[in-house]
Amino acid sequence: MGIPVIQLTEIKKHYRMEAETVMALKGVSLQIEAGEFAAIMGSSGSGKSTLMHIAGLLDYLSEGRYTLEGKDVSSLTEKQMAEIRNQRIGFVFQSFNLLPRCSAVENVALPMLYRRPPVSGHREKAMACLEMVGMSHRADHLPRQLSGGQQQRVAIARALVNDPALILADEPTGNLDAATGSGILSLLHALNRNNITIVLVTHDAEVARTARRRIILRDGRIESEEIA
């Protein structure tokens, strides 16, 4: 087995809330291998969103060690975190987070504009990613001209465009009806079959059951794990 994509060791995260210190994560250790499809689930306040933010380098950890593809990323600067986020992590959010005045293909190409060094062929790569998610025929449409499911497919294409080490999907079906959400999950599984590592964060047990590995958080700790 190769180097894990994610290796979290005794991760703790605490926030200062007025005169009180809130412990969001209380010593979480977790390893995600390349090619895995894992679901992190738990009720509100369990720490799952905090864990995703740390894994996605959207927030700092308070204690512990985090290695991404074997590189220690525990204490990077904000600029270093942003560079690695852009190049190695793709994000899919519940609310899609598409820019309303940009077309589908422009939204997908956006992460490439922040690459250092710059890359060429933005539109061609973005179109290829839209093709992967079945949305190349809507490339020039604005988000408001797309259904919720179509917007999420565009968001998934955007997550793929920089060939990331993994995709972090935070409640990716949360704003969709059951049939549309099922289609998005099927798409994520199809991408996973092409060896794309996916970590899905959800409170929905039905969604989590589609993953081969389920990690259940409670009160800032891993309560249990299940392998399908």
Image (spheres, helix red, strand yellow):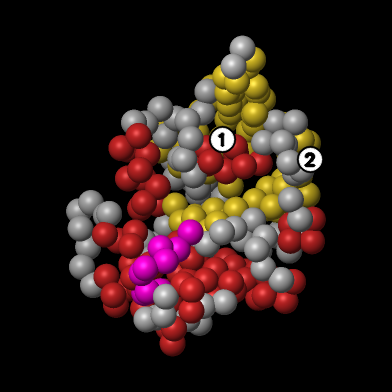
The amino acid at mark 1 is: Leu
Q: Which mark is residue 8?
A: 1
124 or 171, which is in the foreground?
171
Q: Name the residue under label 2.
A: 224
Determine if residue 31 is in view. no
The amino acid at mark 2 is: Ser
| Callout 2: SS | strand
Q: In this view, does 64 lie to the left or right of 44?
A: left
User: Which segment is the magenta one?
Assistant: 97-105
Residue 46 pos. (x, y %): 72, 37
Q: How far apart are marks 1 and 2 (CA)?
A: 16 Å
Taking the magenta stretch, the answer to whether it contains residue 145 is no
Above or below, comparing residue 24 to residue 109 in the picture: above
Residue 186 pos. (x, y %): 65, 73
Residue 101 pos. (x, y %): 37, 68
| Callout 1: SS | strand
Q: Quadrant location of the C terminus?
A: bottom right
The structure residue drawn at horizontal position 23% and vertical position 72%, both measured from the top left corner, is 121
Q: In this view, does 125 lie to the left or right of 13?
A: left
